[in-house]
């Protein structure tokens, strides 16, 4: 009887260890296949940080929302940033709320916001794009250089993010219409 209980306990533990990461991966993949894609314009990125791993740090033009009237009361611990597609095809903030709204807009949850005047500032939760180790730093430099060009010459840099329910997944980063991996490979050939 004791061996049976240990065996069952062991099998439950193994199943739980596979279930948790499996469900996280499944949710991310489901968001990529069923979610709504949005293009988020980027800002210049931070320098490479060797202590955090090989990824591109993403900063987006959408990082605040200006209220027309008075600012509602926020706990600043968790807010809902509602996203819609703008006229230029890129994502823009439709509304920011402390509570869920009854709307068709997609949203992302953000935390640690701060208020200046009538604006609320926040960081979007999809701020890292992981890449192959040898390409992460050249990709970050390529994005930074593209964003430093004069507006008339600069290609648009953006992150393609899929949103479904409460899950948002940064799928790829683009410079112009070329994904960042291809862009870096083309730079290496030159």
Image (spheres, rainbow, N blue to C red):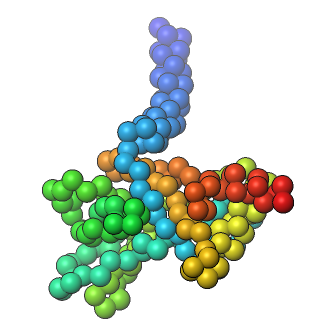
Tell me what residue is drawn at x 65 percent, y 72 percent. 146
Give the farthest residue toward the front.
152
Decide which of 75, 56 is in the foreground and name it: 56
In the rendered image, residue 15, in percent from the top left (x then y), is placed at: 50, 24
In the rendered image, residue 105, in percent from the top left (x then y), is placed at: 25, 57
Question: In this rendering, does residue 127 appear at all?
Answer: no
Q: Is residue 126 above or below residue 115?
A: above
Tell me what residue is drawn at x 15 percent, y 56 percent. 102
Tell me what residue is drawn at x 49 percent, y 55 percent. 160
Q: Is residue 123 above or below residue 177?
A: below
Quarter that holds the C terminus: bottom right
Decide which of 12, 157 is in the foreground and name it: 157
Q: How many marks?
A: 0
In the rendered image, residue 36, in percent from the top left (x then y), is placed at: 37, 48
Decide which of 142, 12 is in the foreground and name it: 142
In the rendered image, residue 176, in percent from the top left (x then y), is placed at: 58, 62
Tell me what residue is drawn at x 61 percent, y 74 percent. 154
Give the farthest residue toward the bottom.
117
Decide which of 39, 26 is in the foreground and name it: 39
Q: Quadrant of residue 79?
A: bottom left
Question: In this rendering, does residue 32 appear at all?
Answer: yes
Q: Say whether residue 17 is left or right of residue 48.
A: left
Q: Say whether residue 77 is left or right of residue 104.
A: right
Q: Say whether residue 140 is left or right of residue 84.
A: right
Q: Quadrant of residue 145?
A: bottom right
């Amino acid at each position: 009887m004791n061996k049976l209980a240990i065996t069952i306990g062991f099998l439950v533990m193994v199943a739980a260890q596979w279930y948790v990461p499996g469900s996280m991966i499944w949710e991310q993949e489901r968001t990529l296949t069923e979610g709504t894609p949005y293009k988020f314009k980027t800002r210049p990125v931070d320098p490479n940080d060797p202590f955090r791993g090989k990824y591109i740090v993403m900063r987006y033009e959408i990082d605040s929302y200006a209220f027309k009237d008075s600012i509602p009361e926020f706990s600043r611990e968790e807010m809902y940033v509602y996203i819609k597609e703008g006229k230029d095809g890129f994502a823009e903030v439709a509304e920011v709320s402390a509570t869920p709204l009854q709307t068709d807009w997609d949203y992302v949850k953000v935390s640690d916001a701060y208020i200046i005047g009538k604006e609320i500032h926040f960081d979007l939760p999809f701020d890292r794009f992981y890449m192959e180790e040898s390409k992460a730093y050249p990709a970050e430099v390529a994005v930074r250089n593209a964003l430093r060009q004069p507006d008339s010459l600069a290609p648009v840099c953006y992150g393609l993010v899929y949103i479904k329910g409460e899950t948002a997944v940064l799928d790829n980063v683009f410079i112009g219409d070329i994904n960042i991996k291809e862009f870096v490979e083309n730079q290496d050939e030159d």
